[in-house]
């Protein structure tokens, strides 16, 4: 598997410089490429892989764990707990008791981008770290993509064409010989405040993911 980016990765100069600025401003924050959040058995045990966009400045860039420290994590982790994809208690910090169950979480871009907007080149460059996570044919059954950028990067990582796998909320699409991709609107505060995404809509995505996994056997949580 492709090794994780170094803490001082400079593959994307703009992101490297942006993080350097935050290191000077907030030296106690994580301020580095954010690694995947994995279940106890590692990536090889993940039946569900959740792909997000990029760390938030005061979220994962601060805490070092995907979707930890901002509103998006509040909705995501409460949903994972509801459908048996996590256990323990989410307290928005990396040393809480939350543990993932048969689930892994990663961002398409590992480093925090200015204004939450990575460039196409940055997305493309960081795909070298995303693609190896999909190479788990014995376990991985569902990939949930949060937002169109995460969805498109996932489709491209599989070597597939975007036109054949359009982004549409809660639309499942099977990868030949691989998992089911289910796209979802991103669980950002902006999307929930504007009504683009509601909590029931988000729950439906993970209800569908649970159904796909349970239909293959070895259920790990409620439907």
Image (cartoon, helix red, strand yellow):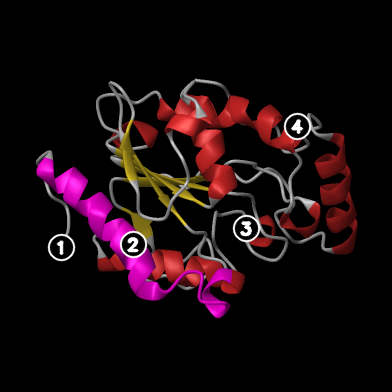
Instruction: Find disc 3 in the rendering and name its residue.
Output: 60
Disc marking residue 177: none
Dot 2: what SS?
A: helix
Left or right placement of residue 173 versus residue 4 in this view: left
Dot 1: what SS?
A: loop
Is 147 magenta? The answer is no
Check the image and report above or below for 13 versus 104: above
Which of pointers 4 and 2 indicates the residue nearer the eye?
Answer: 4
Q: Are marks 3 and 1 in contact (CB under 8 Å)?
A: no
Instruction: Find disc 1 in the rendering and name its residue.
Output: 222
Q: Are marks 1 and 2 in contact (CB under 8 Å)?
A: no
Pinpoint residue 80: horizontal percent, then vertical percent: 33, 62
Check the image and report above or below for 89 versus 213: below
> CA gap, disc 4 to disc 3?
22 Å
Is 194 magenta? The answer is yes
> CA gap, disc 1 to disc 2?
11 Å
Instruction: Find disc 2 in the rendering and name its residue.
Output: 80
> CA gap, disc 3 to disc 1?
28 Å
Query: How would you classify the magenta stretch by its main secondary structure?
Result: helix
Pinpoint residue 201: horizontal percent, then vertical percent: 36, 68
Pinpoint residue 166: horizontal percent, then vertical percent: 46, 40
Residue 165 appears anywhere in the view: yes
Pick whichever, 145 or 148, lies toward us: 148
Q: Residues within 10 Å of mark 1 (few under 14, many from 20)?
A: few
Q: What residue is at 57 percent from the left and 77 percent from the top?
A: 194
Task: Report the magenta residues as a range.
Answer: 191-215
Instruction: Find disc 4 in the rendering and name its residue.
Output: 121
Residue 86 appears anywhere in the view: no
């Amino acid at each position: 598997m492709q090794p994780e980016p170094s803490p001082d990765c400079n593959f994307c100069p703009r992101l490297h410089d942006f993080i350097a600025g935050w290191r000077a401003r907030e030296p106690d924050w994580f301020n580095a490429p954010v690694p995947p959040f994995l279940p106890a058995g590692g990536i090889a045990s993940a039946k569900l892989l959740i792909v997000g966009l990029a760390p938030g400045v005061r979220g994962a860039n601060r805490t070092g764990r995907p979707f930890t420290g901002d509103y998006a994590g509040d909705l995501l982790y409460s949903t994972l707990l509801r459908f048996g994809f996590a256990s323990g208690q989410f307290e928005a910090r990396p040393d809480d008791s939350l543990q993932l169950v048969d689930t892994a979480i990663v961002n398409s871009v590992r480093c925090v981008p200015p204004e939450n907007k990575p460039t196409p080149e940055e997305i493309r460059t960081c795909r070298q770290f995303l693609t190896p996570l999909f190479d788990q044919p014995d376990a991985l059954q569902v990939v949930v993509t949060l937002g169109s950028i995460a969805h498109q990067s996932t489709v491209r990582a599989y070597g597939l064409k975007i036109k054949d796998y359009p982004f549409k909320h809660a639309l499942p699409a099977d990868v030949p010989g691989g998992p089911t991709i289910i796209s979802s609107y991103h669980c950002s505060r902006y999307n929930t405040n504007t009504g683009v995404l509601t909590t029931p809509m988000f729950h439906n995505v993970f209800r569908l993911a649970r159904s796909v996994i349970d239909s293959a056997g070895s259920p790990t949580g409620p439907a």
